[in-house]
Image (cartoon, coloured by chain):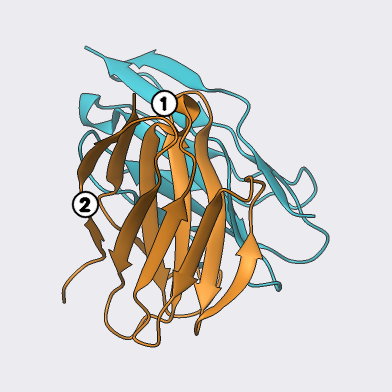
Amino acid sequence: AQRVTQPEKLLSVFKGAPVELKCNYSYSGSPELFWYVQYSRQRLQLLLRHISRESIKGFTADLNKGETSFHLKKPFAQEEDSAMYYCALTGSNYKLTFGKGTLLTVNP
Amino acid sequence: KAGVTQTPRYLIKTRGQQVTLSCSPISGHRSVSWYQQTPGQGLQFLFEYFSETQRNKGNFPGRFSGRQFSNSRSEMNVSTLELGDSALYLCASSLVSGDGNTIYFGEGSWLTVV
C-alpha cells in the first residue's frame, strides 16, 4: 500500500528563517512525488513536482529514495508562504495519495 | 479554460438528512476524485471515478457514495448525516486517474451538519 506521512501538523517560523516541511513516503515501486499548497481562501493547487526538479516561489524539494523522503525547503521564508502544504504520491496503480498536511505560519 | 466547479458552495443540514454535492470537471478531464477536508484530519480521500467507473475508494462508511455521468460530471451523496460529517468537500479532476500533474481542485462545498 502507498502511504504519505507528514509528521508535523503545524510549523511556525519567523520571516527570513529557513523552512523545511517534511514528507516521507511508502511505496514499493518508483513513485512520482508532488507538493500542493492551499493559501487562505484559495483552491488547493500544485506547487512543484519532483520530476521537473524546478524551484517555485523559492521552494525546492529533492526526492531521496534511500530515505524515502521528499522534504520541501526554502532558505528564507516569507509571510506570504503561510499556507497549508500537502505532499502527495502517485504510483503505477493510478492512485494519488495525499499526506495529512502541514500548516505553515510565517511570523513577521 | 473553466476550472472545476462545485455546487452548492455552502449548505447547512440537520442530522439524519441526506445531501448531494455536484462537481463539474475541467473539459476533457475524465477522472474525478472527492476529498473531505477537516482541520483535525486534513485531506482524506473519499473516492475516484474514471469514465463512470469507481476506480479507487477511501476508508469511509457506506453512507458516502458517488457516481459519475457520461459527461464526466460527478455527484457525491451522504446519507443519514452525522455531526462529524461537517467539513469542506473538495472535488478534483484530472486527465486520467492518479495524475498529479494535471489535477485541479474546485473551491469546495462547505457542509455544516447541525
Neighbours of disc 1 within 10 Å: few (<14), some (14-19), many (20+) = many
Q: Percent position (x, y) of residue B111?
A: 32, 38
Amino acid type of the residue tagged 1 in the rendering? Leu
Left or right of A102: which side holds A55? left
Name the residue tied to disc 2.
B8
Q: Chain of mark 2?
A: B
Q: Percent position (x, y) of residue A8?
A: 57, 23
Q: Secondary structure at mark 2?
A: loop
Name the residue tied to disc 1.
A103
Q: Quadrant of the N terminus of chain A?
A: bottom right
Left or right of B114: which side holds B30? right
Q: Colour of chain B?
A: orange
Asked if one can make out residue A55 in the rendered structure from this viewpoint, the answer is no
Q: Residue at x 68, y 63 (%)?
A: A31
Q: Quadrant of the C terminus of chain A?
A: top left
Q: State the residue lying farthest toward the front.
A: B16
- The chain assigned the colour cyan in the figure is A
Q: Percent position (x, y) of residue A99?
A: 58, 41
On the same chain, marks 2 and 1? The answer is: no
Q: Residue at x 39, y 25 (%)?
A: A104
User: Do the CB atoms of the residues marked 2 and 1 lie less than 8 Å apart?
Assistant: no
Q: Percent position (x, y) of residue B114?
A: 34, 24
Res. A16 image quadrant: top left
Position of residue B22 relative to residue A75, above or below, is below
Q: Which mark is residue A78?
A: none
Amino acid type of the residue tagged 2 in the rendering? Pro
